[in-house]
Amino acid sequence: MSRVQQADGHQLISSFDSFLFDADGVLWLDDTPLPGAADFLRHLVSAGKNVFILTNNSTKTLDDYVNKCKRIGFDMLSDDHILSPAKVLAHILAKEKSDLPVYVVGSSGLQ
């Protein structure tokens, strides 16, 4: 796999308005940010880009992710930047405007 050359990186950033990142293994490992990841996201946010962290981990709440981001140096991210299973589920239920009861089978992070 080749590295993106600096000129190509600037072109890539200017070509897109939004950037999606997986969290664990891409931005951090456990509680250790990968080198340059926080600075790169900070650069994107300061350039007015939409930055989103995607996770399929339903064992953590949105607050857990926000607190982790702040704790390990991704303080430029808020809950608006994080897409989790619970957040997607809440959006779908709100969009459907269902007033029917829902029985959720899953970890506590989906509550």
Image (tube, rainbow, N blue to C red):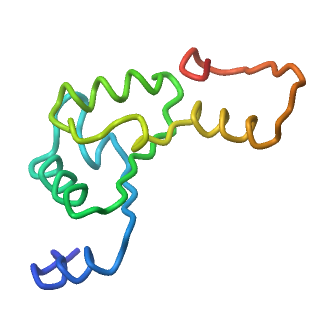
Q: Residue furthest top?
A: 108
Name the residue rendered at 34%, 43% in the picture.
23
Name the residue rendered at 29%, 40% in the picture.
77
Q: Which residue is more in the foreground, 44 or 26?
A: 44
Name the residue rendered at 61%, 40% in the picture.
88
Residue 102 locus on image (x, y percent): 82, 22
Residue 27 locus on image (x, y percent): 25, 46
Q: Is residue 6 left or right of residue 16?
A: left
Image quadrant containing the N terminus:
bottom left
Q: Is residue 18 left or right of residue 105?
A: left
Image quadrant containing the C terminus:
top right
Q: Is 34 placed above or below 51 here?
A: above
Q: Which residue is more in the foreground, 96 or 89?
A: 96
Name the residue rendered at 34%, 29% in the picture.
66
Residue 19 locus on image (x, y percent): 36, 62
Q: Quadrant of residue 14?
A: bottom left
Q: Which residue is more in the foreground, 6 or 30?
A: 6
Q: Is 4 placed above or below 54 here?
A: below
Residue 45 locus on image (x, y percent): 25, 55
Q: Which residue is more in the foreground, 100 or 104?
A: 100
Q: Is residue 67 left or right of residue 35?
A: right
